[in-house]
Image: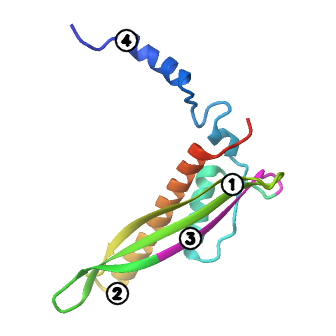
Amino acid sequence: MSWFNRKILLMIPLALSACGFQPVYGTGGTGAALRGKVEVSAPDDVESYWLVQNLEERLGRSASSASDYDLAVTVLTTQQGQAITASNEITRYSIIGTADYTLTNKASGQVVASGKVDNFTGYSATGSTVETLASERDARHRLMTILADQITTQLYSTADLPT
């Protein structure tokens, strides 16, 4: 006889609802409340453009007149050499990115959520100049995707939205 019981599986949703769990995209969830209602700050360089593009994909693009919230995001990246040969040549780099964000309710001016996320990506510098530049660009693009995912996750889990 198996230790697995279907009754236990059916009781999981009841247990989760009893502890205050609410699906993000469910009725009244944070995802549904933010979808298409967030205006992300305008980008000022290529990296912030990628970040804003990714955030708009996840949160839904909003016209400024239809948005209820402003999301101010600032991004900072640094590059560090990681693998150095005996002849002092760097063959691998890491790009470290940090993004600060603040979600503000337009009507009340109240800060609904704020925080800081950071992560890194890497790329190899062992190929030709063109390959290295393409690798660096791809690594920066991947980093902005990762940071957008982290910001979205934190907004969905910590935003104090009116119900």
The mark closer to the camera, 1 or 4, is 4
Segment tinted magenta in the rendering: 65-77
User: Which circle's residue, 1 or 4, is located before the other in the chain?
Assistant: 4
* Residue underneath mark 4: 6
Label 4 neighbour load within 10 Å: few <14, some 14-19, many 20+ = few
Residue 21 vs 142, above or below: the answer is above
* Residue underneath mark 1: 61
* Residue underneath mark 2: 129
The mark closer to the camera, 2 or 4, is 4
The mark closer to the camera, 2 or 3, is 3
Q: CA distance from mark 2 to mark 3?
A: 26 Å
Mark on residue 75? Answer: 3
Residue 74 in the magenta stretch? The answer is: yes
Q: Residue at x 69, y 69 (%)?
A: 42
Q: Residue at x 77, y 56 (%)?
A: 63
Which quarter of the figure has residue 21?
A: top right
Residue 36 in the magenta stretch? The answer is: no
Q: CA distance from mark 1 to mark 2?
A: 36 Å
The mark closer to the camera, 3 or 1, is 3
The mark closer to the camera, 1 or 2, is 1
Which residue is nearer to you in this view: 96 or 40?
96
Q: Classify the position of the C terminus by image quarter.
A: top right
Which residue is nearer to you in this view: 93 or 113?
113
Q: Amino acid at mark 2?
A: Thr
State the predominant SS element of the stretch in magenta. strand
Q: Residue at x 50, y 55 (%)?
A: 150
Q: CA distance from mark 1 to mark 4?
A: 42 Å
Mark on residue 106? Answer: none
